[in-house]
Image (cartoon, grey):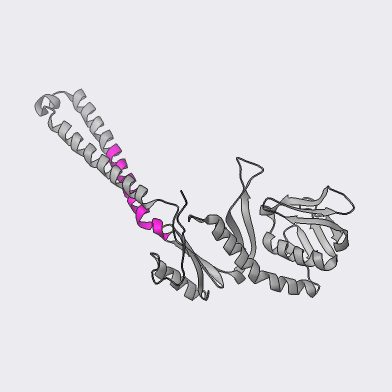
Amino acid sequence: MKSQQDTQNVDSESSPPFYAEVQQLASDHNLGPRCSSYAQSTTSGTRVLVNAIVWFAVSLLGLFFLIDALRKIPLQSTLSDPPTLRSIGAIGVISLVVLFGCFLQGWRNLREYQYHQREQVHIFEDGFVCLEGRNHAYALRWDEIESLMRGTLDPKHPQRVSRDNLSFMTDKDIVIIFEPKVQQRMQLCDEIEQAYTDYRRPGMLELYNLGEDLEFGNLILNEEGITHIHPNNEEEDMLAWDEIAHIEVGPTYTRITSQLKGATPWFEELTADVDNALILKELLSILHNETV
């Protein structure tokens, strides 16, 4: 069955719950006009509400049967038999603890139902706003982001990269892990990565034309070519633009091959470990074509 579209028309008069908080954050950070919204949580509200009702029903029915059972116990004979009284008391206490646990689980589900619609992300012209959980919210401008990394390696499948998450390093050296709990996470990550790239690419291209170095993690670009810094021993290898045979910044790997080494990659690294990989991809497409 085709999943329901979770992006909201920005021209719609209706806004998702908690949007007043989004507007306040966007205004405080001068994010400009809203471009798109992702406001449909991956959590099923119906399922969470049904679970809450079930847990509340279990706790109430259990309490009813416990009270009914206690009423049927002969009081006088029980009081005159201390071992039986202790056993009944222990069973009663354990039953109350279990029923209280059921009640708490129902309460947790009810709270989750109340706040599941708060999981939403709104993209603006100059940044985005993210609401998470009951009270976590933040806004991030494009000019506050120093680097963006897309995806993480799947620990169960070493050759597979999950690309539905982002990592940001801000200009204050704060790392933000972005793992949205909305549907169409891939589309959301694509849009944020592209918007940030569109903001940073012109300035980086201008710096390159002025002769500055552009750093992308272990790679450095300048007018002479590409330099690879080896993190283990800090040695550097440099490849001139006219020595490059092929450049690939793919979803899984980033590879650069040299005309001198044939098919063996001169540089190979997981794209998820490359800072600002999409900016690198678009810049390399421009710079390599200009130099060959």
User: Does residue 100 appear anywhere in the picture?
Assistant: yes
Which x, y percent locates residue 19?
41, 68
**Left or right of 80, for residue 262:** right
Q: Nearer the viewer, residue 91 or 106?
A: 106
Q: Nearer the viewer, residue 292 or 229?
A: 292
Which x, y percent locates residue 76?
9, 27
**Left or right of 76, for residue 124:** right
- Residue 98 on the magenta segment: yes
Which x, y percent locates residue 64?
18, 38
Q: Which residues are magenta?
A: 97-118
Q: Quadrant of the C terminus?
A: bottom right
In the depicted structure, whether residue 182 falls above or below residue 82: below
For the point 88% across and 59% down, the residue is 243
For the point 39% across and 65% down, the residue is 18
Q: Nearer the viewer, residue 160 or 73?
A: 160
For the point 71% across and 64% down, the residue is 282
Q: Place residue 165 in its image quadrant.
A: bottom right
In the picture as drawn, the residue positioned furthest to the front comes out as 1
Q: Place residue 84 in its image quadrant.
A: top left
**Left or right of 198, for residue 218:** right
In the depicted structure, whether residue 242 falls above or below residue 90: below
Which x, y percent locates residue 105?
34, 45
**Left or right of 176, for residue 2:** left
- Residue 292 on the magenta segment: no
The number of discs equals: 0
User: Does residue 176 appear anywhere in the picture?
Assistant: no
- Identify the main secondary structure in magenta: helix
